[in-house]
Image (cartoon, grey):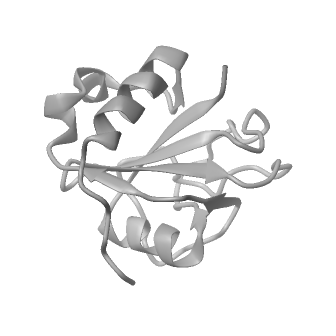
Amino acid sequence: MYQGYLFLCESKSVDNCVKNKKISCSEKQVNVVKEIQNGAVIFLLNVKSNILIGPFTASEELSTGLEPGTWNTSLNNESFSGNIDVQWESLHELKNATNDISFLKNIDDCKLTHYQIQEILEVLKESPLYTKKV
């Protein structure tokens, strides 16, 4: 089994993640980073547009805490820090994500179960490629 995490963000955060190959946001401290290992699958859910993007893969083990706000719906987009280096082969985007993946409507923890990871991956592989260039 592998690890998976879902982080809430906004459009500018997604653009920064793709451009810099790092995942981070700002505002409130989240203490999951000690659990994230090399190879963990990470997804981003844009809370304003309801678009899910992924899968990203954590590219190294992490030893520092996530930048405040990584799991927060109110983001300060002026502060960007690269605490989680990520890589990907191809990113997909799922519009209206909460309509197709019902558990996303009530997500209250950024750590995903194995079954949640599988469901997201299955739906995403049928979704269009994320092609926005930043």
Q: In the figure, 61 relative to 40: above or below?
A: below
Residue occupying the far right of the picture: 63
What is the total number of numbered labels drawn onto the structure image?
Answer: 0
Q: In the figure, 14 relative to 40: above or below?
A: below
Q: Position of residue 78 (x, y in %)?
A: 47, 78
Foreground of the two, 122 or 56: 122
The residue drawn where x is 46% and y is 15% is 115
Quarter in which the C terminus is drawn: bottom left
Q: Is residue 14 left or right of residue 81?
A: left
The residue drawn where x is 64% and y is 29% is 3
Q: In the figure, 4 relative to 72: above or below?
A: above
**Residue 74 lies in what quarter of the image?**
bottom left
Quarter in which the N terminus is drawn: top right
Q: Is residue 65 left or right of residue 26?
A: right
Q: Position of residue 95 (x, y in %)?
A: 17, 49
Q: Position of residue 93 (x, y in %)?
A: 29, 53
Q: In the figure, 101 relative to 29: above or below?
A: above
Foreground of the two, 41 or 112: 41
**Residue 108 lies in what quarter of the image?**
top left
The residue drawn where x is 79% and y is 37% is 34
The residue drawn where x is 68% and y is 36% is 32
Q: Is residue 62 left or right of residue 32?
A: right
Q: Position of residue 30 (x, y in %)?
A: 62, 42
